[in-house]
Image (cartoon, rainbow, N blue to C red):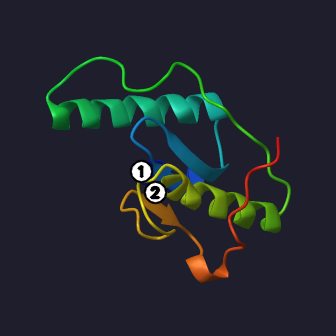
Amino acid sequence: MQALAQEQTVRNFAWVVMPDHVHWLMQLRHGSLGGCMQRFKSRSSLLVNRQLNRSGPLWQAGYFDHTLRNDEDLRHQAAYILANPVRAGLAHAIGHYPFAWCRWPIDDLPPATPRPP
C-alpha cells in the first residue's frame, strides 16, 4: 500500500490488515483499479510468503470496491475500517491495533457505525 502511494498510483486514507483480509480506503490516482489490486496482491504475497518461508496464494481471487462521494463519507468509512479489529476482538479500542493506519487523527473521525448495505 505504501509503495503504491509513494509511486503516486494511489492516495491512502486508511487501511487495516486483518488475519485473513485487508480493508483499504484509497483514491486511485492513475491506472486501473484491477491493475492496482494485482500489483498490491502480487507484491504483498511475495513479501509475506518470503517472510513466512512458504509459497502459494495469499489473497482471494477478486476484490470488493465501493465508491464514496464526499469527504464525510471518507471519514465515516475510515472509522468503520479502523473499528474492524475491535469488532473482531483483536483490539479493545480503535487505535490499539498495530496493523492499521489512518490519514486523520482518530479523535477527528466520526463514531464508527456499521456500513449501510
Q: Amino acid at mark 2?
A: Gln
Whether residue 78 appears in this view of the structure is yes
Q: Which residue is mark 2?
A: 6
Q: Residue at x 55, y 53 (%)?
A: 87
Q: Position of residue 36 (x, y in %)?
A: 56, 36
Q: Residue furthest bottom?
A: 107
The answer to whether residue 37 is left or right of residue 109 is left
Q: Quadrant of the C terminus?
A: top right
Specify the quadrant of the image occupied by residue 105.
Answer: bottom right
| Image point (61%, 82%), residue name | 107
One can see residue 32 in this view: no
Residue count near mark 2 (Cα–Cα under 10 Å), binned few <14, some 14–19, many ≥20 = few
Q: Which residue is mark 1?
A: 3
Q: Three-letter amino acid code at disc 1?
A: Ala
Asked which secondary structure carries label 1, the reply is helix
Mark 1 and 2 residues: CB-CB less than 8 Å, in contact? yes
Q: Is residue 102 left or right of residue 115?
A: left
**With respect to residue 70, does 59 lie above or below?**
above
